[in-house]
Image (spheres, rainbow, N blue to C red):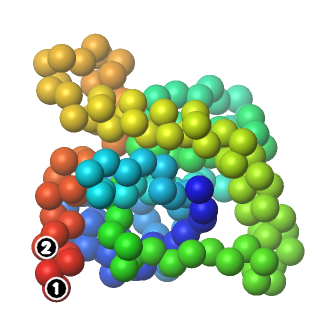
Amino acid sequence: MRFYTIKDAYITYLKQYDSKVADNKSGKRPYVGIILEIAGMKYYAPFSSPKPKHLHMKNAKDFRKINGGKYGVINFNNMIPVIDSAVILIDIQNITDIKYKRLLQNQYNFIREDQDAIKRTAENLRALILKKDSELTQMDLKTKQRCCNLPLLESVISNYQAK
C-alpha cells in the first residue's frame, strides 16, 4: 500500500454524483491505496489527520484508527473507486514540512503492518454497501448511509475516462 493524492478534477467530478465524497483540500488530502481491487476497479480511502477524539473512538466497519488514533484514521466511509490517471503518488522523502513528513512516515509504517486488516475492512464495507437496505440491520443501515454510494460512483467512472 502506498499514499496518493487524487486530482481535484476527478474528485470534483465524483462529487457531482455523491456529496459524501471527501473534500480534496486543493489536491492535498492523502489517500491510502490500493486498499481493494475488484475486477480491475481500484479503491482508495482518505486519511483524516490525528484529532484528540480519535483516541477515544473505536474501530468500526467504516473507520479504522492508525496506531490507536495517534496517527489519525482511515475513513472507509469515504472510500472511492479511482482510475489510474487520477492518482499522484506521494513521495514522502521529498516532503519539506518535517512534522508532516514524520506523520506520513509513521502512518506508512503502521499501515504496512496492518494492511491485511485494512483490506478486509474495505472488502467487508463494500459488500455491506452493495446489499439491499432491507437485508441490513439498523446499525448496518446507518453505516451504509454514512458511506459513499459505490455502485453509483463505479457506474460513472467510465464517463470520466471517456472525457
Which residue is outermost to the top? 137
Amino acid at dot 1: Lys
Q: Residue beneath label 1, please? A: 163
- Relative placement, left or right, of 57 versus 123 is right
The residue at the point 78 percent across, 77 percent down is 93
Query: Disc 2 on helix, strand or loop?
Result: helix
Q: Is residue 157 above or below residue 96?
A: above
- Marks 1 and 2, how far apart at CA: 7 Å
Task: Verify CB contact (< 8 Å) between mark 1 and mark 2.
Answer: yes
Percent from the top left, x then y, of residue 105? 78, 61
Q: Residues within 10 Å of mark 1 (few under 14, many from 20)?
A: few
The residue at the point 28 percent across, 65 percent down is 15
Q: Is residue 134 above or below residue 52?
A: above
The residue at the point 69 percent across, 48 percent down is 112
Percent from the top left, x then y, of residue 86? 38, 77
Number of marks in the image? 2
Amino acid at dot 2: Asn
Give the camera-side residue of 36 and 9: 36
Q: Residue beneath label 2, please? A: 159
Q: Quadrant of the C terminus?
A: bottom left
Percent from the top left, x then y, of residue 101? 79, 70
The residue at the point 30 percent across, 29 percent down is 128
Q: Residues within 10 Å of mark 2 (few under 14, many from 20)?
A: few
Image quarter for residue 58? top right
Rendered image: mark on residue 123: none
- Relative placement, left or right, of 45 versus 132 is right
